[in-house]
Image: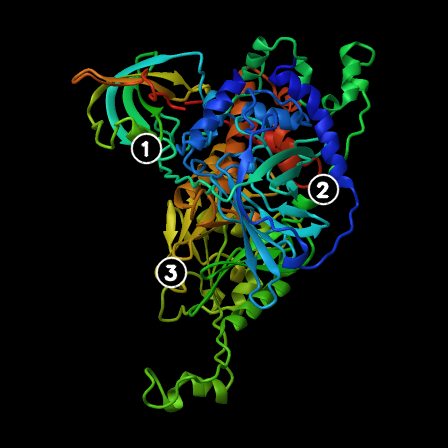
Amino acid sequence: MFNGAQTRFAIRPLLLLACAAVASVPLFSQGGPARAGNAPDISGEWRLENSEDDTTAQPPLGDYTGIPFNDAGRLRSDTTPESIWGTPEYQCRPHSAPHQWRGLGGARILKEQDPLTRDIRAYHIQFMRSLDRPVFMDGRPHPPAWAPHSWTGFSTGEWIGNTLKITTTHLKDGYLKRGGPQTSDMYSMTEFLTRHGDILSIVTVIDDPIYMDEPYVHSTTYAYDPTASVAHEVCNSSAFAENGGTDRHWVPHFLPGENNARSEWLKDENWFPPEAALGGVRTLYPEYRTTLNGTVRPDTLKVPASRSALTIDKRIAEQSPRDGQVHVLPVQGNIYMLVTDGTNVTVSLGPEGVMVVNTGPAQMSDKLLTAINQLANASVLPPTTNNCAGVSCPGAWGWSSPYMNAVISSPAPPKPVRYIVNTSASPDNVGGNLKIATSGFFPRVQGFGAAVESVGRGASIVAHENVLNRMTAAPAAKQPAVPAAAQPTDTYFDEFFKLPAYVNGEAVIVYSAAAANTDGDSFVFFRHSEVIAAGDLYSTVSYPVIDVAKGGTIQGVIDGLNKIIDLAVPEYRAQGGTWVIPGRGRLSDTADVASYRNMVTMMRDRIRDLKSKGMTLQQVKAARPTLDFDGRYGSTTGPWTTDMFVEAVYRTLQEKK
Amino acid sequence: MRRVAYLVVGAAVLAGTATYAHHSYAATYDVSTEIKLDGKLVAFSYRNPHSFVTVQAPDKDGAMQRWSIEWAGSGQLAQAGVQHDTLKVGDEIVVVGRPSRVRGEYRALMVRLTRPSDGFNWGGRAGQVVD
């Protein structure tokens, strides 16, 4: 008789093979929206059947049996403690998507129908600890790579025979199971829902090539139960960290090798091969047994592993495409995000005109200005029919009526660019200053802001004074001096710079991030729109760029990220709310910035630990302290490599307080 | 043993009591160890999915720290007769708990709470377990 772990060890490879086989059968696809008449009805109340091994997915801590982890996935999981839930940003996060079906409390599936055709437009899946999860059946595409990620991701579905195939992208980082095995934020998930009478089987395929050598597959079974009602957990999070102490920015983590949980459970089950407990693709297949009797060495074992369907480097790069184009993403309130050849430009549109945070690379200025003008034009109300005629209507009427003016003349022209904020002096942030500023208008004559006479009536440019210092310094050989009209006109040196009056109906505050990427970084908070333009402090496509020669430090980056987190508030269950536009990469929320802050803090602590042991920079690099995040943020080529990041951290580490 | 734990969890859910933690206690705390804290209550957060008692008490080196003690959710506590005003700021209390697995954290899982001034105590009796 096998005990629990023995059963899991012996059966899981077979189960995985069976599931993979089902998933790979090329079934006929009907395509198009599903009609109510030809697909099984999966709506209703469903009860989780605890009939499968490990259904509740609470394996012993450090038990990665059956997970095709690579070294990065293992390290990430070993160093991420469950205490991470105690940080204010994560206290109310729902279960991660791979665990939702196994998270207890039941499931409810609702149908959303087109009232005319009765086509199913979407299914809505609800769990005890989740937000409503729509599965769109109307053939809509998945959002672009620079759109935000959420806990449940963006799902579309199609019927393949009797099975509903759900494809989910845009997921935040999380975990495969409670208590340990982690995912990156770049995985995709495919689910196959098949109804057999009153049984619903769900086969889930999690494809996370950053942490796994092949997709991870598990199955879950539900039973139809019209008397059940999915539980709903109320979550009251707190602004204080549940991890004690007084540091609200505390990031719990284990240093590599510090977490001894892996060996804890093996003490009780010492028959179990320790190597199999680490997971890994070679341990998943029946062929692994040949290594136990010594006939084959584990490192030479060949197994029929499947490959990831994702080209991960490409998918990361797509969040910040260097394609010579400007892509517009409406964000919230007045704010738009313009992905400009890989650099994000933030635009505020409103009745007073345009405010721009950063102006992109110089070679993109024409396209950027065209995009801004198109947006500004679109924001001017087009002519509309008058639904209210005569003196009985409230407001203006007759020749001063906006309706009449709209009909008899063209609409008012859009207001010009009034303000530019440069969050740093980086060429990608100031390259379009000249073009954008001179296209704009700022009323200096008889008004405030006449700091630089030569800029004439161009837009006001706000930046930290070290940005101006850098832009007015003697240029390097063969480099042209920065024209006066492209230089900041209004600078600050303090903790923050408040725009002196509302811009487009809201307060805008420029915060200093001292000694972060450089000595002149800022981020910008649009207080009514609830959007933060983070500048170079935050990127979803690379480690933070720390220019040590220009005053950047690792601690400054962490402090800057923490400032952003202090200002940002989620809408509900650790998601949405205040949006954060990174310098490069996808639109984000508080939890995304917290995840990045956690990563940067972990890297600081690991490198400090190695340095405190007397390691040289070369020895630290050789120890690969960034291994678990290199697939996500690292690079071996280009302007900012992993080695450069490690060196910048190493050189700017402060002594631990 | 693990199967027994699953059965307990399953029974609790079927009974309609949301006691299944969203995070794992065994993964968060060193459940093989207990620590004792003798200090003053500075906050009582009575909420879901977990309540927290904050205690100002010395660490093993004698330095005063803010300790965050994870307790059951408000629903489970209410069933055990613990209300939002059962504990008051300033109460001198003694807490026995399981410490966090993470070095440097001042966090523990509630096992027993005692208030010597009136003899109030929680822990050890049926239903008085954070599960």
Q: Residue A220: percent from the left, percent from the top?
A: 61, 35
Q: Residue A390: percent from the left, percent from the top?
A: 36, 90
Residue B82 vs A3, above or below: the answer is below
Q: CA distance from mark 3 to mark 1?
A: 40 Å
Is A232 or A446 nearer to us in this picture? A232
Kindly indicate whether the residue at mark 2 contacts the one at mark 3 (C-beta within 8 angstroms). Answer: no
Q: Amino acid at mark 3?
A: Glu
Q: CA distance from mark 3 to mark 2?
A: 42 Å
The answer to whether residue A642 is seen in the rendering is: no
- Do the residues at discs 3 and 1 belong to one chain? no
Q: Amino acid at mark 2?
A: Leu
Say which residue label 2 marks: A310
Query: N-terminal of the two: label 3 or label 2?
Result: 2
Please identify, in this view, whether the residue under mark 1 or under mark 2 is nearer the observer: 1
Say which residue label 3 marks: A506
Say which residue label 1 marks: B74
Q: Residue A129: percent from the left, percent from the top?
A: 47, 39
- Would residue B109 appear left or right of A344 to someone viewing this image? left
Residue A234 vs A84, above or below: the answer is below
